[in-house]
Amino acid sequence: MVQELVIAIVAAVSAGALYTAAAAKVVKQYERGVVLRLGRLRNDVRGPGFTMVLPGIERLRKVNMQIVTMPVPAQDGITRDNVTVRVDAVIYFKVVDAASAVIQVEDYRFAVSQMAQTSLRSIIGKSDLDDLLSNREKLNQGLELMIDSPAVGWGVQIDRVEIKDVSLPETMKRSMARQAEADRERRARVINADAELQASKKLAEAAKEMSSQPAALQLRLLQTVVAVAAEKNSTLVLPFPVELLRFLERAQQPVQQQPVQQQVAPPQTGQPQRPAQGQRAAQAQRPAQAQPRPGPRPPQTSSGASAPAPSPPPVPAPPNAVPARPSRPKPLARH
């Protein structure tokens, strides 16, 4: 009898220990416990620490209350100015109502992720490329508002949304690079033109001052020569007066040589020698080019008329001249 009583006590203690182990729950500091009794929500949400539930009747579900950092996958979209871009973002959120996060939505993490992707595509379609690249603060606020509106009913609060990266096509990158380069070149040209204008004004004032003092121009020339000679890497050419250059040019002119008379070889005996073709042309032109030299003025008679001028002496023909042959008439062409 005693033995049976001891066995019963041991069995009861063992059952109580098992029941206590099944009913005892520990909720961490960053968690909250939502209790469902027979599938029905209990109004009291268990806080951090030790708590007890009825095994088989109540079920405790722990909800993490920490801020969750969730990356939003990159989304392809077309901006309002018809540019294809690829944008990814990151979202920070936390659960503020553990009961709503368990009851209102099946998986609040998956729901927030899908809502973030949809909102990101919508923001891409409503924005220009310049806004995506330079005005991200406004887009982040709009994206946060779009995600936070449905998430409030899930017991989730969106803490922050940030657009992380915007990927552009290679052609668009090259176009933007050319645009930036052209803008930089335009600014450089404007600055250079402004500098030229200011320099021209200063040079005009300097020329006006130098015109009153001619020696100032010579001093400025000597200063320029000193500045150029200090580098020792260029050839320095000093200006000379034009009169000196002309004198040197006249001194270097060669003396004209006297023409050498061409000697004509005597003809060989036994064979008549015919002059060359060049000699024939020279002999033919020599009588035509010979002109009478102007002689003394003829004396005038008492009546005032001048006496007839004496005729020039005849020019003797050269000894090897060939008599001209009579020209023959050309035969008529037969048709």
Image: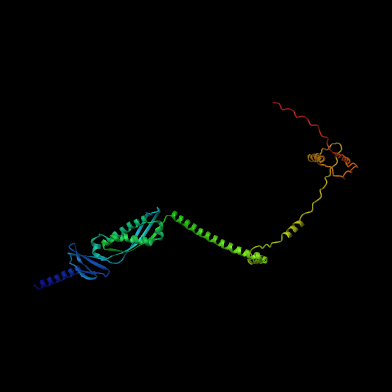
Work out whether residue 106 or residue 119 is closer to the camera in this orientation and state it. 119
Up/down of 13 relative to 129, above or below: below
Q: Is residue 228 left or right of residue 48?
A: right
Q: Is residue 12 left or right of residue 135?
A: left
Residue 149 place in picture, x, y as percent:
29, 60
Q: What is the quadrant of the N terminus in the image?
A: bottom left
Outermost residue on the left side: it is: 1
The residue located at (32%, 61%) in the rendering is 145
Colouring scheme applied when the structure was drawn: rainbow
Tell which residue pokes out farthest to the front in this image: 303
Residue 323 in the image, given as x and y percentages of width and height:
83, 35
Q: Residue at x 59, y 64 (%)?
A: 202
Q: Quadrant of residue 43?
A: bottom left
Question: Is there any visible trace of residue 88 in the rendered image?
Answer: yes
Q: How many marks?
A: 0
Against 157, residue 125 (above or below) is above
Image coords of residue 123 (percent x, y): 35, 57
Q: Which quadrant is home to the C terminus?
A: top right
Q: Is residue 224 visible?
A: no
Question: Foreground residue, 62 or 115?
Answer: 115
Of 21 and 4, nearer the camera is: 21
Q: Where's residue 40, x and y in %? A: 18, 62
The image quadrant of residue 313 is top right
Residue extending furthest toward the top: 335
